[in-house]
Image (tube, helix red, strand yellow):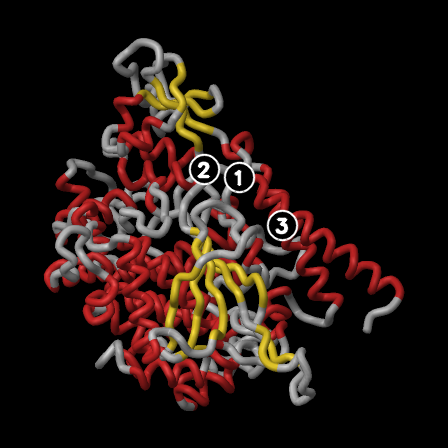
Amino acid sequence: HLEGDKRRRLEEGSARVVRLGMQFQHNLSDPASLGHLDVPRDKLAGLPASLLARMRSVGGGDNLSVDGSSLHSKGSKEVIGGRGRGGEGSTARVPLDSQSLGATMRWVQCPETRRAIYTAAHAGPEANRDTLAELLEARAEVAGLLGFQSHAHYITAPLLAGHPDAVRHLLGDMSSRAMDRAGEEMEMMLRYQQRAGAQGPGIRGGSGTVRGWDRAFLIGRARSEECQLDAAAVAAYFPLDKVLRGVSALVGRVFGVALTEVDMRPGENWAAGVRKLRVSTGVGQGGGGEEIGTVYLDLSPRPHKFPHAAHFVIRCGRQRNRGGGGSDSGRQQPAVALVCNFGGGQQMTSGSSALLSHSEVETFLHELGHAMHSVLSDTQYQHLSGTRCAMDLVEVPSHLFEYFAWDPGALSLISGHRVTGDPMPAEMVRRLKRGKEMFGATDLQQQIVFALTDLEVHALGGAGSASVSDIATEVQRKHSLMPVEPGTAWELRFGHLVGYASTYYSYVYARCLAAELWGRFFAEDSLAPGAGEMLRDGLLRHGGAIAPAEVLRGLLGDAALRTPPGGQGNAPDPSRALAELES
């Protein structure tokens, strides 16, 4: 509807958004942009040997350095670290990519080493500072040309939220209601910090401080000691083939469909080890009913493969020539691929002895939730099929499926010891759930900080607005007990600012809605057939063909969604999700 100069500016602005988004993400995967830290190997104690072995050895050195620059402790001229055991290769070059950062924050015992790595990693990539500012300015210009107050208003208008105010109200409400519980979790982290002998200045009345580089380490230590779970012992209950058989039994009982592994046609697979599951109705016939779709499993890591877990649509479902008859009538069957990187190099082929960690089982169920959304939808048009729905609705089925990874009834189907075949013992399930729940409010605070920062930087009015760093700092100070670390800018590493672009809040919406669905339909009997059929008919089959608010009110009733006082838009009721923090 735009003409002349406005149309040209819109096209140019949209092209800039794509280009700048690609540049931002490139900087997050470019080793030169991310940098590295040279650390004496004896300062990396606690890091699993397999991870340490993958780090390049450099000549023995006297300090920690980032790209050749020495790091000093705050307020001191003394160099951190000191000499390693000496000799060639006594120093490891730690890349500052997300995987290495996560591993060192979780496992390295020396707090000064963690501090140095954390600070270096979160100081950049510096190139993303200008790139992000330009990206946000371009998005604001595009939204303005289309008649919207901001990019956040433009993006949320057609979604479930409908308006940024609905998101702000929900996240602010959840933040305040979870703060006391987060304080209790902070006190637990402080107790474990004090056991390790680390002391610091006060934090909100506490006797010490948990810094950004302490959080993952202390949470891991607390979960390990409180729950007394050995990861290898847990994984022994999740042989891959048993998990697949159990998941097939699960969706059979809950949704009335069967997953049956079938052979590939010549040339059908794109890599060795890819597996194919036929999805069909007629569970009572051993899956011999009507075929309704295909799910490919690409689960093994390999060089140059997509490094994360994701659900990819290969072919959408749709109605062909509705009412017209002929050879092109009927339903086009959907096909999707679940792409993961499981098993630390184990091959996930049929008959494999590969074991999954419990975290990998949860991830697989999350992606399977997306797959069931794609396969079980029944829409006239393919652009509205399955996961092609509102961004703040699309994660609801996947979050709901995660509950099965913690549910005793579902785990009785999914798990089976690699030697005895026995399902996971009830006490082990209880300890797993205890570990999940221990720091639920802390995790929620982190998600709220991410979501509100994403929303508010996209609510900026363009050039001359408050800086992105100022917004990120203010949001964290208001909604998290974790301190803002001087000299860091975590938003420069937050790739979801590109992909979600105002809608990262979708994960919090999904968390609330999945909790409501689980409590309503699954909590009393997670394997009840009626619950799955209601979910299928009330949510999954609609894809994006019906407005999300209408879908949810039809499934959960009018009270399932709320409008903020004096505001606009829709937000889910967070009561069940918040109650889980107290369980």
Q: Counting other residues with Cα less than 10 Å from the Cα at mark 3, is it few (<14), some (14-19), or many (20 or more)?
A: many
The residue labelled by disc 1 is 29
In this rendering, would 463 be left or right of 98? right
Q: Report the amino acid beneath label 1.
A: Ser
Q: Which residue is drawn at 36% across and 42% down?
A: 102
- x, y (%) of residue 533? 38, 84
The residue labelled by disc 2 is 97
SS category of the residue bearing label 2: loop
User: Can the viewer see residue 568?
Assistant: no
Q: Report the amino acid beneath label 3.
A: Gly
Which label lies toward us, 3 or 1? 1
- x, y (%) of residue 109? 23, 34
Q: Quadrant of the C terminus?
A: bottom left
Nearest to the observer: residue 367 or residue 46: 367
Q: Residue at x 20, y 45 (%)?
A: 232
Q: Quadrant of the N terminus?
A: bottom right
